[in-house]
Image: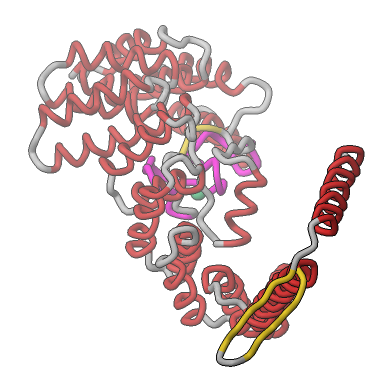
Amino acid sequence: MTTLRILIWFVVAAAAMRGAVWLAERPGTLTAEWQGWRLDTNVGVVVIVVVVLILLGVAAWLLWRWIAGAPGALLEGWGDSRRRRGYRELTQGLAAVAAGDAAEAQKHARKAEQLLAEPALTLLLSAQAAQLTGDRDGARRAFDAMLKDEQMAFLGLRGLIGQSLRDGDQMTALGYAERAFALRPQTPWVVHSLFDMQAQTGHWKAAQDTLDAGMRRKVVAADKGRALKALLLVERSREAERAGRDTDAQALAREAFSLAPERIVATGRLAELQIKAGDAKRAAKTLERGWAVAPHPDLADLYLKAAGESDPLKRIGIVRRLAACNPDDIESHLALAKASLDAGLWGEARRQLETAGGTSPPVRVCRLMAEVEERANVDQAKVHEWLARAAIAPADRSWSCTACGAHHETWRSVCESCSAFGTLQWRAPGTYGQILPPDLQAELRGTTALPSTTGA
Ligand SMILES: [Zn+2]
């Protein structure tokens, strides 16, 4: 490159020298006459004057450009420093929010707002600072303003959902969650919180649609989704029955049972409707299939109801048929013990209860034992002994919430204590599970106080 430049310079210099020599070899004069003025000069001087004039013109043009451009460049530099200061305020404000320093956060938020002409950026800080100071209206205004910006709308909705839930206004929260879902249907917290709200407010069909969308996008695990869907179908079946649409009710219950036969309520619901429709044989088949995977005293009662038998001895035979579907489960022994007790077969009742209780009989076994001794009327001391044992016996199976651990007398789809949907399970206390990973739950609880999203 350099060699090429030197070469060019060399050629130019040579050409200039040749030109000068050429001019010198051909001397001549130039004469100009104008308005009685006369100028005599030679060609060399004219060439030099022309070159000087061109150089002066270029210099003047450069000077003009510099003068004209200066204020803009100056303003630009000033704007840059303003923006830099704005960003610094924003950063410090966010740090103050993270540190929980409300006053400091608000101070930086105000300064950042003045310095930065980008409301979208400062709104989040303003909203969080307002939340920290407990200024609910301020926070709501900031979140509302965020909805106008395409980039920030989703974040604004998240803030508004959390705020509405804290205010106990679930219907407003639901409206915001629907908008958030329309914006980003693939975001897990949106799917989970929208589903929770729809289920908690009894919008079963809408909840089912959300669940289906979540399963399609793999935001909800297939197995969890299947069980939750079955419970929604159970609720929809109840709703249809209340509206007098028994055929629809049975179709929904059948779908629920085929999805999750391990769900006691799905089995019970279908059997109930089959008995109601006069189809006792089908009801018995349904109950036998359900008993094999998830036995429950209510299912045994329905089985006896389907059989329509009133003779106590014959009822034992019927229960035996059901128990044979799951012979080792404690519920089978308890059902047989109860039927034997009703028939006055104390020995058989005792034998079933002893098998059911094993080495540490739970509360239900102790109570039934006391009842057997009471009704057999042999030894009053034994009655007292069993009642005393019942008081300290290990806890029994019951409808307990896997999210909060609360116990319920009967099954319901929404836990009365923590509002989670589908978390009630028939089991002994001790094992709890949750649908969301713990870090995501903590995040949701910490920033927007959404309810824990749990399932079973
Ligand atoms: Zn609960």
Residue 81 is left or right of residue 194, and the answer is right
Q: Residue at x 51, y 55 (%)?
A: 451
- Determine which quarter of the picture holds residue 344: top left
Q: From the top left corner, tell me how far across and down residue 305 is, in percent.
A: 22, 23
- Residue furthest toward the bottom? 36
Is most of the magenta stretch helix, strand or loop? loop
Q: Pinpoint residue 413: horizontal percent, then vertical percent.
A: 37, 42
Residue 451 painted magenta: no
Q: Position of residue 73 (x, y in %)?
A: 68, 76
Q: Residue at x 63, y 54 (%)?
A: 443
Q: Is residue 403 magenta?
A: yes
Q: Is residue 19 left or right of residue 312?
A: right
**Relative to 372, is 101 above or below?**
below
Q: Residue, x 63% and y 90% (percent of image)?
A: 37
Point out the stretch of residues depicted in magenta: 390-417
Is residue 65 visible in the rendered image? The answer is yes
Front-lying residue, 433 or 181? 181
Q: Is residue 100 visible?
A: no
* Whether residue 118 is situated above or below residue 278 in the rendered picture: below
